[in-house]
Each structure stands twice: as structure tokens, then as C-alpha cells.
Amino acid sequence: MNALTSIAQQAAAKLIANKQTIAVAESSTGGLISASLLAVPGASAYFLGGGVIYTRDARRALMDIPDDAMKGIRSASEPYAQLLARQIRGRLSTDWGLSETGASGPTGNRYGDAAGHSCMAVAGPQHEVITLETGSNDRAANMQAFATAALELLLKNLAR
């Protein structure tokens, strides 16, 4: 968690300096992204909320994304990561939305993605989406790698 907190501290400093806020929608990281941002003292100045959107029911209830909005989009994909980031940003009226969706392992997901596959997106003044493939089936290591990549994506876009 120390490495994650280090990146989160840098992101927090930029968010505070710019008087900006963030919300997080994550899946296979299981809350590590939010926990890292919340581990920084003063998080209430920039962190408005988030959720672990792990199932279809969570997507429907917590994100208010109905099934018809998912036509042509599958979970653990770049379009879904973009949708989550935009939706969490809008639902919590934040400057930034950050999302992650993937397959942490030890097996792949039902969509055909191998363990170690994750897509993450940032939505705000800048928008960006990336895919990470670790090639590993180590669930805990993948969760850390996905959270690290998501926080680094945020930090990169905050610096623009």
C-alpha cells in the first residue's frame, strides 16, 4: 500500500492545489484506488466518493447504468472503463472521474480476457483510457498493479 499511497499523495497535492474533486468507480482493484486516495490526510478536500462496481447489479444500482446503455459494450473493456469514469464523475458532480475494470485472476473472466487484464479511464478536463496486461495470474499482485496504473493515469492527466 505504501507505493500506492505515494502516488495518491502526489495526485492529492495536485487536486488540492487546483481545488478539484474526484470520484472513483473500480472493479477488480476491490477498493485499493479509493483506499489509497483516502489514506492521504485531508482527503475530504478532494475525494467525494466511489464504489466497487463488481457485478451487473452494482452497475445498475450504484452507477445507474441500465442494460440498454450497455448495448455493444462489454465489461473489462476500454469503452466500459470510459463509461464508468464519465458516469461516476457525473453522478457525484466531480471535476474528475477515475475507473478500473478487469480480471485480477487467478483465472480470466467470462468475456475471454486473461487474468492480468485491466482497462482504466480518467474523465475530466482531459480524458484518457488505457489497457494493462500483466501476463500474471497472481490476484493480489494484479490488484496492486491495476491500482498503481490507474493512479498513475490520474496523476499524468492532472499534470497536463
Image (spheres, rainbow, N blue to C red):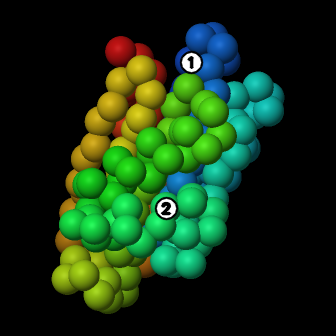
SS at mark 2 in the image: loop
In the visual, does 40 lie left or right of 149?
A: right
In the visual, does 103 lie left or right of 155?
A: left
SS at mark 1 in the image: helix
In this figure, which residue is indicated by the disc labeled 1?
14
Label 1 neighbour load within 10 Å: few <14, some 14-19, many 20+ = some
Q: Nearer the viewer, mark 1 or mark 2?
A: 2
Disc 1/disc 2 C-alpha distance (Å): 30 Å
- 65 in relation to 92, above or below: below
The amino acid beneath tag 2 is Ile
Q: Residue furthest front?
A: 68
Specify the quadrant of the image occupied by residue 13: top right
Q: Nearer the viewer, residue 67 or 39?
A: 67
Give me the disc on residue 65: 2
Q: Pinpoint residue 152: horizontal percent, then vertical percent.
A: 40, 38
Q: Nearer the viewer, residue 32 or 3?
A: 32
Give me the disc on residue 47: none
Specify the quadrant of the image occupied by residue 23: top right
Q: Residue at left 55%, top 69%?
A: 60
- 125 in relation to 104, above or below: above
Where is the N terminus found, in terms of image quarters?
A: bottom right
Q: Earlier in the sequence, mark 1 or mark 2?
A: 1
In the visual, does 39 lie left or right of 113?
A: right
Q: Residue furthest top?
A: 17
The amino acid beneath tag 1 is Lys
In the visual, does 136 lie left or right of 17?
A: left
Q: Pinpoint residue 79: horizontal percent, then vertical percent.
A: 27, 54
Q: Residue at left 38%, top 51%?
A: 83
Q: Nearer the viewer, residue 125 or 14?
A: 125
Q: Residue at left 42%, top 72%?
A: 67
